[in-house]
Image: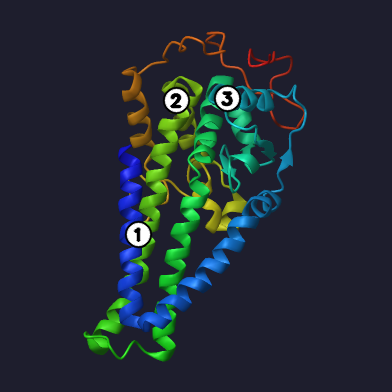
C-alpha cells in the first residue's frame, strides 16, 4: 500500500509540475495543446508498444505447453487467478526479462535465453511472478500516463524556446528560462522515481504470486552479476526500452540514483529477504507446486539455447 501511495503522490507532483510549467511557459492554451499532443502520441505508443517491443527484440512466442517456461507462467497465472499471457523467449545472452501489454487480457511476458540458462526453475518462477505482478498492477498504463505528462512538459519547454513564454508570467524572462530548464529535468526525475516505485511494488507482488520471496531474491542476485558481465546490444541501441526490464540492461547502480530507472538490486534483495527473515533459501510455502529439491536445474525447452544441460528433467510445474 505504501508504494501505491507514493506512486499517487509522485503522479500528483508530475501534474503540478505540468500545470505550473504550462501556465508560466505557454499559458492555458499552450498547456492544453501540449497535453493533447502528448496524450495522442503516448496513447498510440501504449496501444502498439507490446507488439513493437517484442518485434524489436525478435522475440519468439512459446506455444508448446510442454515447454518449461510456458508451464511455469501458466501455473503462476492460474495460482493468482490471472489470464494466461503470451510467453516469449528472446535470443539474447544477457539474463533479463520484461512484461508488456495494455491489460492483463492482452499481456505478454518475455525472458532471454541467458536468463533460462542461468536460473533454476524456482528462480525463473520468481522472475516470471515479478513480471506478472507488473501486468496485474497495470504498470504499463501508469508509466504511459507518466510519459504523457513528461512529454507534455517537454513540449511546453520547446514551445517557450521558439515562441516565448506567456505574457502573464509573473517571473518574466528569468522565470521562463528557469522553467525551460528545470521543468523537464524535474519531470524526468519524477518519472524515474515512479518507475523505481513500481519495481518495488512488482517485487512484493511477485513474491506473493510465487509464494516465496527468496526465489526472486536469489534470481535478482544472479541477474545483477549477469547484467554487469554481458552486454545487451539491442537495449544499448534503444535505451528507451531499458525501464521495461526487471534489471537495468544498460548499467548497474549501487544506490537508488535520481537518474536510475531501477532501484538498486541490493535494496530490492534486502526487502525480499526481510519478508521471510531468511538469508538462505526459504522452505516452500504450503501449497506451492515446487518439489523442494535443492539441486538447481536449468529450464529447458524447444528454443535453441534455452537450457544447456542435456538430459535435465522438466520440473514439477507440469500438471
Relative height, residue 149 to residue 174 (above, below): above
Q: Earlier in the sequence, mark 3 or mark 2?
A: 3
Give the residue drawn at x 52%, y 66%.
Answer: 39
Answer with mark 1 or mark 2, whichever residue precedes in sequence: 1
Left or right: residue 178 versus residue 234 is left
Q: Secondary structure at mark 2?
A: helix
Measuring from the top left, give residue 214's x and y in whole percent. 42, 22
| Residues under numbered marks 3 and 1 in contact, where contact means CB atoms less than 8 Å apart | no
Where residue 99 appears, as percent x and y from the top left, is 58, 42
Q: Which mark is residue 76?
A: 3
Residue 14 rendering spot, x and y as whole percentages: 35, 62
Q: Which mark is residue 189?
A: 1
Q: Given this view, does label 3 or label 1 mark the residue nearer the observer? A: 3
Which residue is at a point 68% across and 23% down the rendered structure image?
68
**Which mark is in front, 1 or 2?**
2
Res 47 quadrant in image: bottom right
The secondary structure type at the circle numbered 1 is: helix
CB atoms at circles 3 and 2 under 8 Å apart?
Answer: no
Amino acid at each position: 500500500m505504501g508504494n501505491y501511495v507514493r506512486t499517487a503522490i509522485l503522479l500528483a507532483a508530475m501534474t503540478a509540475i505540468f500545470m505550473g510549467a504550462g501556465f508560466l511557459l505557454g499559458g492555458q492554451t499552450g498547456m492544453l495543446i501540449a497535453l493533447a499532443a502528448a496524450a495522442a502520441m503516448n496513447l498510440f505508443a501504449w496501444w502498439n508498444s507490446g507488439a513493437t517491443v517484442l518485434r524489436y527484440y525478435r522475440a519468439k512466442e512459446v506455444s508448446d505447453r510442454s515447454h518449461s517456461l510456458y508451464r511455469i507462467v501458466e501455473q503462476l497465472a492460474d495460482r493468482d487467478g490471472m489470464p494466461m499471457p503470451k510467453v516469449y523467449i528472446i535470443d539474447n545472452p544477457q539474463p533479463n526479462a520484461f512484461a508488456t501489454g495494455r491489460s492483463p487480457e492482452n499481456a505478454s511476458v518475455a525472458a532471454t535465453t541467458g536468463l533460462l540458462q542461468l536460473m533454476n526453475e524456482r528462480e525463473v518462477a520468481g522472475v516470471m511472478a515479478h513480471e506478472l505482478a507488473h501486468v496485474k498492477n497495470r504498470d504499463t498504463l501508469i508509466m504511459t500516463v507518466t510519459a504523457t505528462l513528461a512529454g507534455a512538459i517537454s513540449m511546453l519547454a520547446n514551445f517557450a524556446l521558439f515562441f516565448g513564454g506567456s505574457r502573464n508570467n509573473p517571473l518574466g524572462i528569468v522565470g521562463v528560462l528557469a522553467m525551460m530548464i528545470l521543468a523537464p529535468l524535474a519531470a524526468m526525475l519524477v518519472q524515474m522515481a515512479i518507475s523505481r516505485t513500481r519495481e518495488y511494488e512488482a517485487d512484493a507482488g511477485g513474491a506473493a504470486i510465487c509464494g516465496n520471496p527468496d526465489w526472486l531474491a536469489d534470481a535478482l542476485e544472479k541477474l545483477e552479476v549477469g547484467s554487469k558481465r554481458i552486454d545487451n546490444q539491442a537495449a544499448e541501441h534503444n535505451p528507451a526500452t531499458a525501464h521495461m526490464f526487471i534489471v537495468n540492461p544498460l548499467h548497474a547502480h549501487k544506490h537508488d540514483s535520481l537518474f536510475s530507472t531501477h532501484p538498486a538490486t541490493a535494496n530490492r534483495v534486502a526487502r525480499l529477504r526481510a519478508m521471510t527473515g531468511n538469508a538462505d533459501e526459504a522452505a516452500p510455502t504450503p501449497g506451492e507446486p515446487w518439489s523442494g529439491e535443492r539441486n538447481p536445474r536449468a529450464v529447458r525447452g524447444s528454443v535453441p539455447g534455452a537450457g544447456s544441460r542435456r538430459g535435465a528433467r522438466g520440473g514439477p510445474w507440469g500438471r
